[in-house]
């Protein structure tokens, strides 16, 4: 891994590598807390997960990708809690809906 420290706290971009030397995770820190873009990759290098942190908490849309780069899951976070639209794609099925304060809004589900 590579990264920087300031006064004993992680800062700026940290990159983690597989045993083969491929970057498999990149995360950003501010004052020791995750803050900024976050990306995780498969061992082969293709993007696996992406999202954003603010002050150590998940924020905005997070996506999960298959190995061909297609989004198979997407969730929205506010202050580290599921809150907003989501979608799950499985072969020929697409499920969409909404979370409110961490709870799935059953009325919003569509397939």
Image (tube, rainbow, N blue to C red):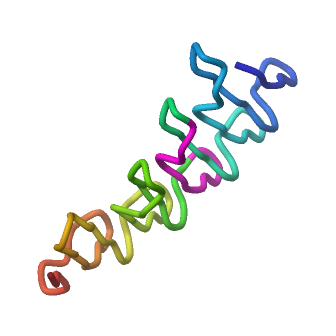
Residue 62 screen position, x and y as percent: 47, 60
In this rendered view, identify the residue nearer to me: 96 or 41: 41
Residue 110 screen position, x and y as percent: 16, 84
Residue at the extreme right: 6
Residue name at image x 61 percent, y 47 percent: 38
Residue name at image x 83 percent, y 22 percent: 5
Q: Split into 4 quadrants, where in the image is the C terminus?
A: bottom left
Q: Is residue 14 magenta?
A: no
In this rendered view, identify the residue nearer to me: 35 or 91: 91
In this rendered view, identify the residue nearer to me: 75 or 5: 75
User: Could you say which quadrant of the image residue 10 lies in?
Assistant: top right
Residue range (magenta): 45-56
Q: Would residue 70 be found to the left or right of residue 38 on screen?
A: left
Q: Would residue 103 be found to the left or right of residue 38 on screen?
A: left
Residue at the extreme top: 19
Residue 17 screen position, x and y as percent: 63, 23
Residue 19, relative to residue 74: is it above or below? Answer: above
Q: Split into 4 quadrants, where in the image is the N terminus?
A: top right
Residue 12, relative to residue 109: is it above or below? Answer: above
Q: How many marks?
A: 0
Q: Would residue 33 be found to the left or right of residue 67 on screen?
A: right
Residue name at image x 38 percent, y 52 percent: 66
């Amino acid at each position: 891994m590579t990264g920087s420290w300031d006064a004993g706290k992680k800062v700026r971009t940290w990159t983690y590598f597989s045993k083969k030397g491929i970057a498999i995770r990149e995360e950003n820190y501010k004052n020791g807390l995750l803050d900024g873009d976050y990306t995780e990759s498969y061992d082969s290098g293709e993007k696996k997960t992406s999202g954003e942190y603010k002050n150590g908490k998940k924020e905005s849309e997070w996506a999960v990708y298959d190995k061909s780069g297609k989004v198979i899951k997407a969730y929205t976070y506010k202050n580290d809690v599921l809150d907003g639209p989501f979608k799950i794609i499985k072969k020929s099925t697409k499920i969409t809906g909404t979370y409110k304060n961490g709870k799935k809004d059953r009325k919003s589900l569509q397939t």
